[in-house]
Amino acid sequence: NCSADAKGELDHSEETGENNADDQETGDGNVSQNCTYSYDQLKSKSENPATGIDLKRRETYLSEEEFETVFGMTKEAFYKMPKWKQDGKKREVDLF
C-alpha cells in the first residue's frame, strides 16, 4: 500500500531535482505505481475505498497480477489501446 500523499501524479524529479520513489514512468508516458490497493478498494462503489489516489487512474494502483485478473490483459497491452477503449474497459469493471 501507499503513503497517504501518493496521488498518482507524474514524477517531475528532473525539473525539481526531487526523487519520488512511489511512481515510476514506464516509457510510454504512463506512471506505474509501486504501491498497490486491492480491486475491492479501487472500485467506484467500494465499501472500503482507497484514499489519496488519483480517481481517474484507479487501474494504476492494481498489482500486475490483479490487473491481469480484472482486465484479462497486461498493463502494457491495456495502455497500447486507444483511450476510449481503456475507458470502456474501466467502465466494465467499475474502475471509471
Image (cartoon, rainbow, N blue to C red):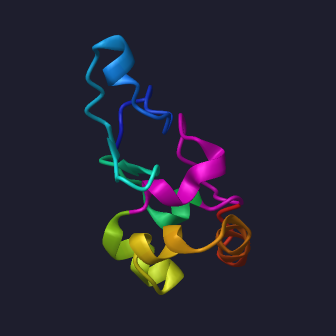
Q: Where residue 26 sits in the image (x, y, percent)?
A: 34, 53
Q: Residue at x 54, y 40 (%)?
A: 53
Residue at the limit of the structure toward the top, as seen here: 16
Is 96 situated above or below 86? Answer: above
Is 53 situated above or below 74? Answer: above
User: Which quarter of the picture shows residue 61?
Assistant: bottom left
Q: Where residue 78 sits in the image (x, y, percent)?
A: 51, 73
Residue 49 on the magenta segment: yes
Please report the bounds of the magenta region as a residue range: 43-62
Closer to the camera in the image, 22 or 4: 22
Residue at the limit of the structure toward the bottom, as seen here: 72
Residue 50 on the magenta segment: yes
Left or right of 24, for residue 37: right
User: Which quarter of the picture shows residue 25?
Assistant: top left
Quadrant (top left/top right/bottom left/bottom right) for the C terminus: bottom right
Quadrant (top left/top right/bottom left/bottom right) for the N terminus: top left
- Total number of numbered discs in the rendering: 0
Q: Residue at x 38, y 17 (%)?
A: 15
Left or right of 75, for residue 22: left
Q: Residue at x 51, y 67 (%)?
A: 79
Q: Where residue 56 sits in the image (x, y, percent)?
A: 66, 49
Is 6 situated above or below 30? Answer: above
Helix, strand or loop: magenta stretch: loop
Q: Residue at x 39, y 31 (%)?
A: 11
Left or right of 82, for residue 13: left
Left or right of 56, for residue 7: left
Closer to the camera in the image, 37 or 34: 34
